[in-house]
Each structure stands twice: as structure tokens, then as C-alpha cells.
Image: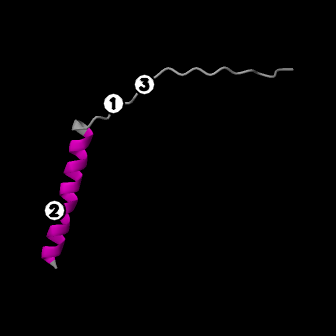
Amino acid sequence: MIRLIKILFFFVLLGFLGLVGYAYLGDLDPNQSERTQTMTLDVN
């Protein structure tokens, strides 16, 4: 049982390190573009 918990802990740690590595090294820059939208206001 202890062996199974150690293996599970290892995979959780490996997944966490992979997620942190992807967050720091991955291409996470947002694509920016200017958007304009015209509006007509119906004011009485």
C-alpha cells in the first residue's frame, strides 16, 4: 500500500513540475489586436 502511495505522489509531483515548466517556458503571450465597434444610442 505504501508503495502505491509513493508512486501516486511521484506522478502528482511530476505533473506539477511539468505544469510549472510549461507556464515558465511555454508560449503564453496573448495575441493583441485593436478592435473597434460602433454603437448608436437611442436617447430620448
Q: Which residue type carries mark 1?
A: Asp
Residue in view at x 38 percent, y 30 percent: 30
The quadrant in which residue 32 appears is top left
At which x and y percent is residue 7? 15, 68
Identify the colour scheme used: one colour
Q: Nearer the viewer, residue 2 or 23?
A: 23
In the rendered image, which quarter contains the N terminus?
Answer: bottom left
Work out which residue is located at the far left of the displayed protein and give it.
3
Q: Nearer the viewer, residue 9 or 18?
A: 18
At which x and y percent is residue 19? 25, 48
Q: What SS does tag 1 mark?
A: loop
Q: Which residue type carries mark 3?
A: Gln
In the rendered image, which quarter contains the C terminus?
Answer: top right
Give neighbour class at mark 2: few <14, some 14-19, many 20+ (Cα, 10 Å). few
Q: Which residue is mark 3?
A: 32
Q: Which residue is mark 2?
A: 10
Is tag 3's residue or tag 2's residue first in the polypeptide sequence?
Answer: 2
13 is higher (above) or lower (below) than 36: below
Residue extent of the magenta highlight: 2-23
Is residue 10 magenta-colored? yes
Does residue 33 appear to the left or right of 37 in the view shown?
left
The quadrant in which residue 39 appears is top right
Is residue 36 magenta-colored? no
Cα separation between marks 1 and 3: 9 Å
Cα separation between marks 2 and 1: 30 Å
Q: What SS does tag 3 mark?
A: loop
Q: Which residue is mark 1?
A: 29
